[in-house]
Image (spheres, helix red, strand yellow):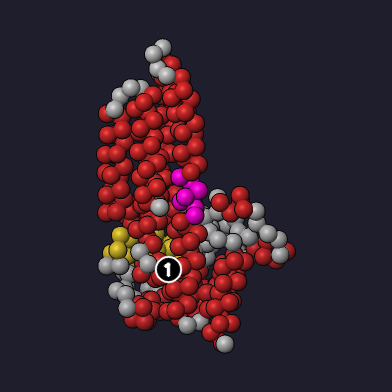
Amino acid sequence: MMTVFFLLVVIIGFVLSLMYSNPSILYYAILFSLIMNVGSYWFSDKLVLSMAGATKIESKDQYPELWNSMENLCITAGLPMPSLYIIDDPAPNAFATGRNKDNSVIAVTTGLLPLLTKSELEGVLAHELSHIGNRDMLVNTVVVVFAGIISLVADMALRASFFGAGSDEKKNPIFFVLGIVAIILAPIAATIIRMAISREREFLADSTSVSITHYPEGLSLALQKISNFHQPMKIQHAAIAHLFISDPTGVNDESELRNDEKISFVAKLFMTHPPLSERISRLTNTTTNTLE
């Protein structure tokens, strides 16, 4: 998937180099994508925490239950203790970020702690810890940067094509038309890929969480409670929405679950998270298989 993002950047650069008969545009596109990729690896956690308005929990005394649960889960999973952060927000949610397991962060909202029981909280924390163990934080964060780069470059190229590309009569009109099409479709393709990666990593984290807690009902019940809370988070950024365990905009499929309705294939393509019904169904099947 990361290769596809890189190729999209290269394709945009290649098309622009043909449109403007300037090969250096392609080289700059490749260099720009590489620089942004490296930058996202080292500084992504600080950027995400700042965008989420998270504050670091400095000592165990501030949130003892949260701290103790995290310590126990880390021992079970064989992972180092991540830095814990709190987000002052009544909407229940959580996310993990950081470049690797030794430099990882888990943040939860103040609304999550009183809503969940201990086993449900452990299910959520194990889910976020699974993202760390599966290196999802790095994948998700770099995906965000690449998708942002593609959208930015495409927007700049589209503006340039309207205001400057038509002045040279020697330019091939076929390349110009193809360039406009590629510039328009590239951000859409980048968004679909980003959403697909996010959904698959959520399923994987759910599964890994169960292997840590050995209690699928904890995460399943937590997801239902989080979904039934309809108030969106106070601070929202579309670029980091996929990092949370639940969509921070408050848009969820609780009604779909209640009414047993199906979400269309096209709608799923643009969802940051898998439908709640599918996640709970998989967790329920895990419980059944365990009992058998």
Give the percent coordinates (x, y) of residue 261. 71, 61
- Quadrant where the C terminus sits is bottom right
Tell me, yes or no, if residue 71 can be seen here: no
Residue 32 falls left or right of residue 287: left
* Foreground of the two, 219 or 118: 219
Looking at the image, how many numbered discs can be counted on the residues? 1
Residue occupying image coordinates x 65% and y 53%: 264
Q: Is 164 covered by the magenta stretch?
A: no
* Foreground of the two, 284 or 66: 284
Give the percent coordinates (x, y) of residue 140. 40, 56
CA neighbours of label 1 inside 10 A, class few (<14), some (14 to 19), many (20+): many
SS under mark 1: helix
Q: Which range is magenta? A: 190-196
Residue 224 falls left or right of residue 83: right
Give the percent coordinates (x, y) of residue 4. 40, 47
* Foreground of the two, 36 or 97: 36
Q: Is residue 196 above or below residue 122?
A: above
Residue occupying image coordinates x 26% and y 39%: 31
Q: Is 194 covered by the magenta stretch?
A: yes
Residue occupying image coordinates x 67% and y 65%: 257
Overall secondary structure of the magenta section? helix
Q: Is residue 122 above or below residue 33?
A: below
Which quadrant of the view contains residue 45?
bottom left
Tell me, yes or no, if residue 41 can be seen here: yes
Residue occupying image coordinates x 42% and y 79%: 212
Q: Is residue 171 above or below residue 158?
A: above
The residue where tag 1 is placed is 128
Give the percent coordinates (x, y) of residue 198. 47, 57
Name the amino acid type tagged 1: Glu
Residue 117 falls left or right of residue 230: left
Residue sitting at the far right? 259
